[in-house]
Image (cartoon, grey):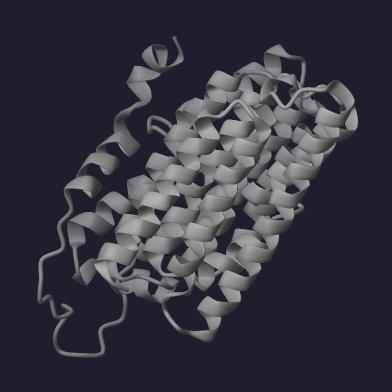
Amino acid sequence: MSPLTTMLLLFSLGMGTTLTMTSHHWLMAWIGLEINTLAIIPIISKQHHPRATEATTKYFLTQAAASALILFSSTMNAWATGTWDISQMTNPTATTLLTTALAMKLGLAPMHLWLPEVLQGSTMNTALIITTWQKLAPMSLIYLTANNLSPTILLLTGILSSLVGGWGGLNQTQTRKLMAYSSIAHLGWMATIATMMPNILILTLMTYILMTTTMFMTLTTTKSKTLQDMAMAWTTSPTLTSISLLTLLSLGGLPPLTGFVPKWLILEELTLQNLTPTATTLAMSTLLSLFFYLRLTYVTTLTMAPNTTPTKHKWRFKTPSSKLLTTTTTTTLFLLPLTPLLTS
């Protein structure tokens, strides 16, 4: 793909998301989502591989169906109330449809099945875009309509997503699929808190994006696509693999790392709202996710792969280094002391 085409597609991605985030009219928000979808499709399919084509088709069909549902729900609301304002979504049927559509766009369970398949058919960098940037536009719509969305549906999809995200990742050996189920679990936490405390939703989304970016960049630097690759990653960069242990534990939500902040605040808010069973279920589901994160850390840093060759090191033609990875790693690990500042 030529640099001009790449620049145009990335600009369209940015513009689509920005348009959705800044609009007050449903049609403009829908146009932003469509621009976003159409820009990412060539990026996914650029490998000219059957898996990439399959991933593109699955992504397009799910996103197109979700966009159609959003347009249908906004039209239904406009028919009933006479307004296209995003914050005036008051028709009960329209809000139920919108909640379902946004859950489908994000990849929340039970509309999650497309996400692992699409990530597996994409490159690491494309998978990073899908799991981070592509979540911003639907999440901004949830934030804007939080007062009118159905809390019951969001709580149910949130609990189900956190459970599915934990269970689904247990049997995976592909790192991209592991990250997909990790994404589903994190999105479940966001859906649970969305109608109660939208500010915590934003904080959770930001920390999730930071942690996921760090993990994907680590996987890209070490060229690790499977657990077996992760076992040999220490020869590429021992320091990076040591730090990846902490990054994975942060994704699992262990204190005193950054990933603990959103989980702590969400569980506290759920308990205050007398939703103790929900909080307990979410906390228990985190143990499932933590298991596969720990398995990944064990393979990566706590064991040494069998060496069948005389040399213990891979060929390194270029020393891997990234300033962005340095920044994101620092924030992924050390933001817990700033919790009072972040929540004020």
Give 204 or 315, whichever is nearer the viewer: 204
Q: Quadrant of the C terminus?
A: top left
Kindly identify the residue that appears in the image at 59 percent across and 45 percent down: 31
The answer to whether 15 is drawn above or below residue 307 in the figure is: above
Taking the image as shown, residue 42 lies to the left or right of residue 338, namely right
**In the picture, residue 48 is in which quadrant?**
bottom left
Q: Quadrant of the N terminus?
A: bottom left
Give 183 or 228, whichever is nearer the viewer: 183
The answer to whether 239 is drawn above or below residue 309 in the figure is: above
Extreme-top residue of the structure? 344
How far across and how far down the image is residue 332, in percent? 34, 38
Q: How many marks?
A: 0
Kindly identify the residue that appears in the image at 46 percent across and 14 percent down: 343
How far across and how far down the image is residue 18, in percent? 46, 37
Kindly identify the residue that appears in the image at 48 percent across and 60 percent down: 40
Taking the image as shown, residue 69 lies to the left or right of residue 229, namely right
Kindly identify the residue that appears in the image at 49 percent across and 52 percent down: 131
How far across and how far down the image is residue 335, in percent? 33, 27
How far across and how far down the image is residue 243, in percent? 27, 50
Give 299 or 116, whichever is nearer the viewer: 116
Give 173 or 106, whichever is nearer the viewer: 106
